[in-house]
Image: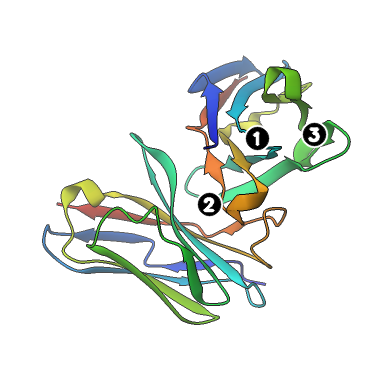
């Protein structure tokens, strides 16, 4: 298996622009997680899906952030409009069932820089 | 609410020395505890986890951790550090009523000197 795939790996954009991050979970996994990692706040869960349905989006910072999972093999995290404080590494992870005992498998991350 | 505190944002050891990375948690219900490792420019991968039963948990790459309820701790150890152990280590907690949600600590960067 190729593991969790994220694209792009690096994104540099200007303030105000729309940014879309993409994730392909491991085939057969039913749960998908989006995390953000910054020096100041560490690793934070933004949202997670189970069977393509958002279960907990309490970590989404504000309305500028939105996430979708239209099918079991694809998810997007969109920021519109982007701001410099959104600069971070965004990780996508998937797990077989989403139960807490399941290992989460992380993608390599997307490093976002907003100028 | 659950939380995790990792003591020391950076730990440096010599090759062959004992590795000890500290993690304390806060939870009002029995927790599930995890250690993840992040190598440079990579995502996190699971080292080990505690669910129930034996409090000493063995993981990959020679790491182990002991759950001590009385101390609310889950420290990570390895008897002899290798250069390849240099990475960032994250402790995380989850509980039954939070589904698959993990709460991560701030991370500890481990450096290994030759």
Please state the horizontal and vertical placement of residue A111, each as a whole percent of the image.
35, 54
Q: Nearer the viewer, mark 1 or mark 3?
A: 3
- The mark that comes first in sequence, 2 or 3, is 2
Q: List the residue tagged with mark 3.
A: B62
Q: Quadrant of residue B33?
A: top right
Q: Which residue is mark 1?
A: B84
> Does residue A7 appear to the left or right of B36 in the view shown?
left
Relative horizontal placement of residue B41, taking residue B32 as reference (left or right): left
Q: Chain of mark 2?
A: B
Query: Pointer 2: residues within 10 angstroms few (<14), some, or many (20+)?
Result: many
Point out the residue furthest to the bottom here: A71
* Lower position in the chain sequence, tag 1 or tag 2: 2
Q: Secondary structure at mark 2?
A: loop
Residue found at x 52% / y 50%: B42
Colouring rule applied to residues: rainbow
User: What residue is at 40 percent from the left and 55 percent from the top?
Assistant: A58
Could you tell me how far apart the alpha carbons at marks 2 and 3 are, in whole angstroms?
Answer: 20 Å
Q: Secondary structure at mark 3?
A: helix
- Within 10 Å of disc 1 (Cα), the crowding (few <14, some 14-19, many 20+) is few
């Amino acid at each position: 298996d190729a593991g969790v795939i994220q694209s792009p790996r690096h994104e540099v954009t200007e303030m105000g622009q729309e940014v879309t991050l993409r994730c392909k979970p491991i085939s057969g996994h039913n749960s998908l997680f989006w995390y953000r990692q910054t020096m100041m706040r560490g690793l934070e869960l933004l949202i997670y899906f189970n069977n393509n349905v958002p279960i907990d989006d309490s970590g989404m910072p504000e309305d500028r952030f939105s996430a979708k999972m239209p099918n079991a093999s694809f998810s997007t995290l969109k920021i519109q409009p982007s701001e410099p404080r959104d600069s971070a590494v965004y990780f996508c992870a998937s797990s077989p069932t989403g139960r807490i005992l399941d290992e989460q498998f992380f993608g390599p991350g997307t490093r976002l820089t907003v100028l | 609410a659950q939380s995790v505190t990792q003591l020391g944002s950076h730990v440096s050891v010599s090759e062959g020395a004992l590795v000890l990375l500290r993690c304390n948690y806060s939870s009002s219900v029995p927790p599930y505890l995890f250690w993840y490792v992040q190598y440079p420019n990579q995502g996190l991968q699971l080292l080990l986890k505690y669910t129930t039963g034996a409090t000493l948990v063995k993981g990959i790459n020679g790491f182990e951790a002991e759950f001590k309820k009385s101390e609310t701790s889950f420290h990570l150890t390895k008897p002899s550090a290798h250069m390849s152990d240099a990475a960032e280590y994250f402790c995380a907690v989850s509980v039954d009523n939070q589904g698959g949600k993990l709460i991560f600590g701030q991370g500890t960067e481990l450096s290994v000197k030759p």
